[in-house]
Image (cartoon, helix red, strand yellow):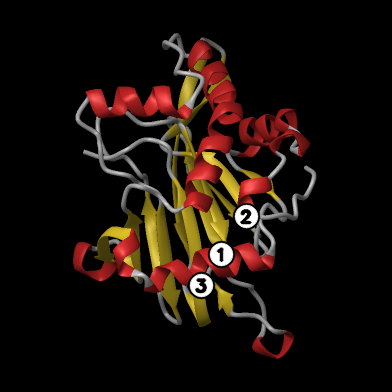
Amino acid sequence: MTAVASRPQALDWRRIDWNEVETELNAWGAARLPGLLDPGSCAEIAALYDQPERFRSRVVMRRHGFGEGEYQYFAYPLPATIAALRTAAYPPLAHIANRWRARLGEAALPETLDAYLADCHAAGQTRPTPLLLKYQSGDYNRLHQDLYGALHFPLQMAILLSRPGPEAEGGDFEGGSFLLTEQRPRSQSRAEVVPLAQGDAVIFPVRDRPAEGQRGPYRLTLRHGVSRLTRGQRLTLGVIFHDAT
C-alpha cells in the first residue's frame, strides 16, 4: 500500500490500493496503511487528550475489567481532523463491507457516512464513538469487540500516534503491540500481531468476517487488544463508524 504523508484534511485516499487492503483483510483479518498520518498530525491529535471539552466521557479501564489504561470518547461535533478521517475512510471500507455482507446474504450498507449515521440515529445510537486511548508503562487492553448497539459497521481503524522504540532512538514507548485473534468454528484461535510505526493505521473487523467453507460462507469471530507496555506512553486514535446507544 502507498504511504500517505500529509495532514488529515488533505489525505488523498485514492492513492491507497483498496484491492490490496481487501486482500489482506480476507487473508489475515487486518490490513496496515503505512504512514497514513505524518508526525505533525499525530502530535496535533494526541494533544487533544488534554482538552476535556473535546470529549463526552472518560473510561478508566481497570474499573470495568478492560485492562489497564484509559480512553476518552470524542463529543460531537468532532474535531475537524477526526471528522475528515472518518468521512473519507467510510466509502472505500463500505465497499469492502458490502462485499462481505453479500457473501453472507445480508443487505447492503449505505455508501456514505452521513446516510449510515442517520440509520444509527434512527435506531437510538446517537453518541459518537471515535476515541483516544492512552497507555502508560504496565498498561494493556484485554481482547474485546467494540459493539455499542444493535447496529455496527463491520470494519474499524486504529492509528498509532506515538513513536515506538527504545528511548535512546527517540521512541516514546516499548511493548504495546496491536493484537488480533481469530476464532474458527471447532478450531483453536489464531493470533496476529500487527507491527505499527507512528502514523500507521490498521484496519480490522469489529466482530467477524466471512470465510469460505465446504458448505459455503461462514463467520470467523475476531477480537483485538494491546499487549503490555514495558516503557513510556502510547496514544492511539480509534476510528469507529457506528455511533453508540
Q: Earlier in the sequence, mark 2 or mark 3?
A: 2
Q: Residues within 10 Å of mark 2 (few under 14, many from 20)?
A: some
Helix, strand, or loop for circle 2?
strand
Q: Position of residue 226 (x, y in %)?
A: 47, 62
Helix, strand, or loop for circle 3?
strand
Q: Residue 177, which numbered label?
A: 1
Helix, strand, or loop for circle 1?
loop
Q: Residue 234, which numbered label?
A: 3
Q: Nearer the viewer, mark 2 or mark 3?
A: 3
Q: Is residue 185 left or right of residue 19?
A: left
Can residue 63 be seen here? The reply is: yes
Q: Residues within 10 Å of mark 3 (few under 14, many from 20)?
A: many
Label 1 and label 3: CA atoms lie apart by 10 Å
Q: Is residue 244 above or below residue 137?
A: above
Verify CB contact (< 8 Å) between mark 2 and mark 3.
Answer: no
Q: Earlier in the sequence, mark 1 or mark 3?
A: 1
Q: Position of residue 1 (x, y in %)?
A: 78, 42
Q: Is residue 2 left or right of residue 218?
A: right
Q: Residue 33, which numbered label?
A: none
Disc 3 residue type? Arg
Residue 221 placement: quadrant: top left
- Residue identified by numbered label 2: 194
Label 2 and label 3: CA atoms lie apart by 15 Å
Disc 2 residue type? Val
Q: Residue at x 46, y 29 (%)?
A: 113
Q: Nearer the viewer, mark 1 or mark 3?
A: 3
